[in-house]
Image (cartoon, grey):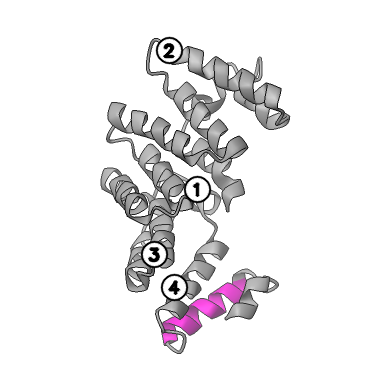
Amino acid sequence: MKKLFIVAVILCLAVPSLVFGQEAEKKPSPLQVYLSEKTPENFVEAYNTYNAQIADSMDYSSVMSIAWLNLFELDRNEEAIAVYEKLNEATPKWSCPWRHKGQAYYQMKNYPEAEKALLKAIETRKEHYDAYIWLAEVYRDWGQYDKGIATLAEGLSYYGKDIEDPEKEYSSVDVAFLHLDLLKKAGKSGTEAYQHVLEHAKILAPEDERLKQY
């Protein structure tokens, strides 16, 4: 799932040039160079370049690039969160930074802050499909299984209605196993709903090892 982050941010921002730069076809951006060869030198070069670009103004593409450098190379969730907060302050109605901040808090196991950020993502874009799915993950790991089930059900109602490709944000296979996990932990393994989701998971991923858990 984590490997899909870079796809998610590109799609979530809607315009690929926001991350990679408008001159991407002519010359690779520092982030592209780093992604093609993840060396310490390329990381430092990209980090310094983007820092310089935001020194005098709020350059959103540079801010987001720094956030992703932190997450992918060093897993510095705290630093990434600080970057997202800058975006929250500058563009409070932009749903994407709220969603990704929620995910960063989730990875830190700070579930109250993850919930707060993801709810804000949903408030700023009601149909933000993957924000619901990540919030359901938060509730699962937080032990609030019924809340997770309800949140997941609401999120699924927006499948295909958001501006992003839902399969690239959070695959239906992973959603099915998240749903199974929530139902199982909520003590609903014997229900019709559980059996329906289980059969759906078998159709989607008949060879998936996770089926053995259910």
Residue 93 visible from this viewpoint = yes
Q: Position of 145 compared to 120: left or right?
A: right
Amino acid on which the number 1 mark rests in the picture:
Asp
Q: Secondary structure at mark 2?
A: loop
The residue lying at 66 percent from left, 15 percent from top is 27
Lower position in the chain sequence, tag 2 or tag 4: 2
Up/down of 156 relative to 64, above or below = below
The 10 Å Cα crowd at callout 4, few under 14, some 14 to 19, many 20 or more, is many
Q: CA distance from mark 1 to mark 4?
A: 24 Å
Residue 182 badge:
4
Q: CA distance from mark 1 to mark 3?
A: 27 Å
Q: Main secondary structure of the magenta part?
A: helix
Q: CA distance from mark 2 to mark 4?
A: 45 Å
In the picture of the structure, the residue carrying the numbered disc 2 is 55
How far across and down, in percent of the image, does residue 170 sit? 51, 54
Lower position in the chain sequence, tag 1 or tag 4: 1
Q: CA distance from mark 4 to mark 3?
A: 11 Å
Q: Secondary structure at mark 4?
A: helix
**Would you say the residues marked 2 and 1 are in contact, meaning their CB atoms lie under 8 Å apart?**
no
Magenta extent: 192-203
Residue 24 visible from this viewpoint = no
How far across and down, in percent of the image, does residue 119 sit? 30, 51
In the picture of the structure, the residue carrying the numbered disc 3 is 142
Up/down of 195 relative to 56, above or below = below
